[in-house]
Image (spheres, rainbow, N blue to C red):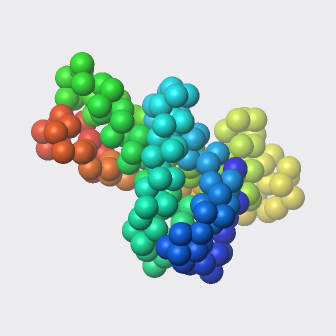
Amino acid sequence: MAQDTPPRWDRKMQQRLARGEAAALSELYDRFAPLVHSLAHRVLDDDEAADSTTRDVFAHVWEHPDAYDPRRGPLRSWIAALTQERAAGRLRKQQRDGSPEQIEEKVRTASAAARADYIVTSMPASLRAALELAYFQRRDYRQTAERLGVTEDEARRRLRLGLQLLSSATTRALPAAPPGAPRVPPGVGRAQ
């Protein structure tokens, strides 16, 4: 799992990339390649395509470091969104055999799953631990509270917040389809 980075690190990294420091790209790759590859693989379900998408993402970051806007969020989130966009575009190209509705449904489903993975790995450890206890180990909120050493109210709060974060995985809009990709009519099979 990639580590959270402070905004200052993000800005310095962007400046180093803009100056063309190869060491900065190497450092960025070491930190975020596992995230990029896992998100791409989650969407594409193919190691070779995930490898190619990973290369594409880091090439884009290297060539366009100014595309990142620190005011819009962490570098990690921008890279994850870029990965999702690239992987969804690649999936659309691979799936040209199906109907536009089938293609968009597959892209939507894979993208939601990738967003859920990203959200879970990015959420604070306290929320992630509560969700893991409640949903993977089938503990109720009382058992979760006891296991975490917190009050029952705190356990319920953590579970509620974790679930709210996860629900955003299915409510966020998909990246725009690239030019020439099949389009789904408004209101059909797309998250709003």
Q: How many marks?
A: 0
Q: Is there any visible trace of residue 164 in the rendered image?
A: no
Q: Residue furthest left?
A: 185
Note whether 156 is above or below 90 in the view shown.
below
Q: Residue furthest top?
A: 97
Identify the residue at image location x=45%, y=46%: 56
Identify the residue at image location x=14%, y=44%: 186
Q: Nearer the viewer, residue 17 or 147?
A: 17
Point out residue 151 in the picture as x, y percentages from the top left corner.
79, 62
Q: In the picture, residue 109 is in which quadrant?
A: top left
Q: Nearer the viewer, residue 41 or 140?
A: 41
Q: Is there any visible trace of residue 55 in the rendered image?
A: yes
Note whether 110 is above or below 83 in the view shown.
above
Q: Is residue 178 left or right of residue 137?
A: left
Identify the residue at image location x=33%, y=26%: 94
Point out residue 87 in the picture as x, y percentages from the top left corner.
41, 40
Q: Nearer the viewer, residue 112 or 180?
A: 180
Identify the residue at image location x=73%, y=57%: 125
Q: In the picture, residue 185 is in which quadrant?
A: top left
Point out residue 68 in the picture as x, y percentages from the top left corner.
44, 69
Q: Is residue 68 left or right of residue 185?
A: right
Note whether 34 is above or below 162 in the view shown.
above
Point out residue 116 in the picture as x, y percentages from the top left corner.
53, 45
Q: Nearer the viewer, residue 110 or 85?
A: 85
Q: Is residue 80 left or right of residue 101?
A: right
